[in-house]
Amino acid sequence: MDISPPFDAGIPVHSVYPIPQRKLVIMNGETTRSDCHEGIALPWVVDVRAEKHPVTIATFPVPKPPAEAPYNDFCFRGGRLGPHHPNNFKAPGEMRIDLIGFSWFEGGWRLYDIANPFRPEEVAWIVPPVGTRRGTEAALIEWDRKIIHVFDDTGLYILSSPALGEPVLGPLKPERWSVEGLNIGAL
């Protein structure tokens, strides 16, 4: 799949998150410059039913600041804006194929409903306070406990969302992992 050009801001392809049960791939680039001095690399939904002819079928919405923010666009917050990582591929529990999260650096972390792959819809978000580095870098969703761990330069945020269901608090030994056998034999 050739996306550069026209989508050649920063790193054209940074992460790829397969959802083989739906014959979809979630793919994103990465913005490398601060203060929106280059185009925002967006996450895309890619249809891979015809593996030799993948087709981009949707982009994810650009995050909007909360109403109480002193700016109306994350470009005015300072720092980088754009997707970085989807939620970790390997996580405890069975991965949901209708939800995916993305870290957006200074745009925080966003959870999207992708039940309709042609129209990703934001269903939850967090924008941590401004730190000194790069903002929100990554997240892990514990699918079995319905808990989200968001990693930001200001700390670790542990969250729940109605989109995931009621969280399971306290210790819980994982019964399975989202991807069985991943990293078996690795040192």
Image (tube, rainbow, N blue to C red):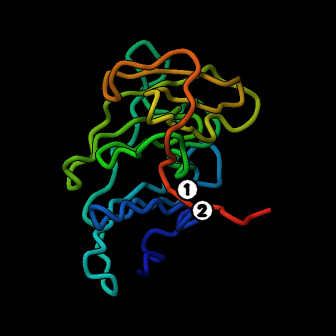
Under mark 1, the amino acid is Glu
Q: Position of residue 101 (x, y in %)?
A: 44, 41
Q: Residues within 10 Å of mark 2 (few under 14, many from 20)?
A: some
- Nearest the camera: 89 or 103? 89
Tell me what residue is drawn at x 54 percent, y 63 percent.
9
From this view, report whether residue 146 is shown above or below residue 75.
Answer: above
Badge 1: residue crowd in 10 Å (few <14, some 14–19, many ≥20) = some
Mark linked to residue 153 = none
Task: State the residue position of label 1.
Answer: 38
> Which numbered tag is attached to residue 10?
2
Residue drawn at point x = 20 percent, y = 55 percent: 118
Q: Given contact means CB atoms under 8 Å apart, are the residues at marks 1 and 2 in contact?
A: yes
Q: Amino acid at mark 2?
A: Gly
Pick the front one: 42 or 139: 139
- Point out the residue furthest to the top here: 68
In the picture as drawn, the residue positioned furthest to the bottom comes out as 52
| Spot occupied by residue 142 in the image (x, y as percentages of width and height) | 50, 34
Q: Image quadrant of residue 30? A: bottom right
Question: Which image quarter holds the C terminus?
Answer: bottom right
SS for tag 2? loop
The mark nearer the N terminus, 1 or 2, is 2
Give the Cα distance between marks 1 and 2.
Answer: 7 Å
Total marks shown come to 2
Please name which of the two marks, 1 or 2, marks the residue nearer to the observer: 2
Residue at image coords 46%, 40%: 93
In the figure, residue 139 lies in which quadrant?
top right
Q: Position of residue 114 (x, y in %)?
A: 27, 47
- Give the secondary structure at mark 1: loop
Q: Is residue 156 above or below residue 185?
A: above
Q: Residue at x 64, y 33 (%)?
A: 151
In the image, is 56 to the left or to the right of 149?
left
User: Looking at the rendering, which quadrant does residue 27 occupy?
Assistant: bottom left
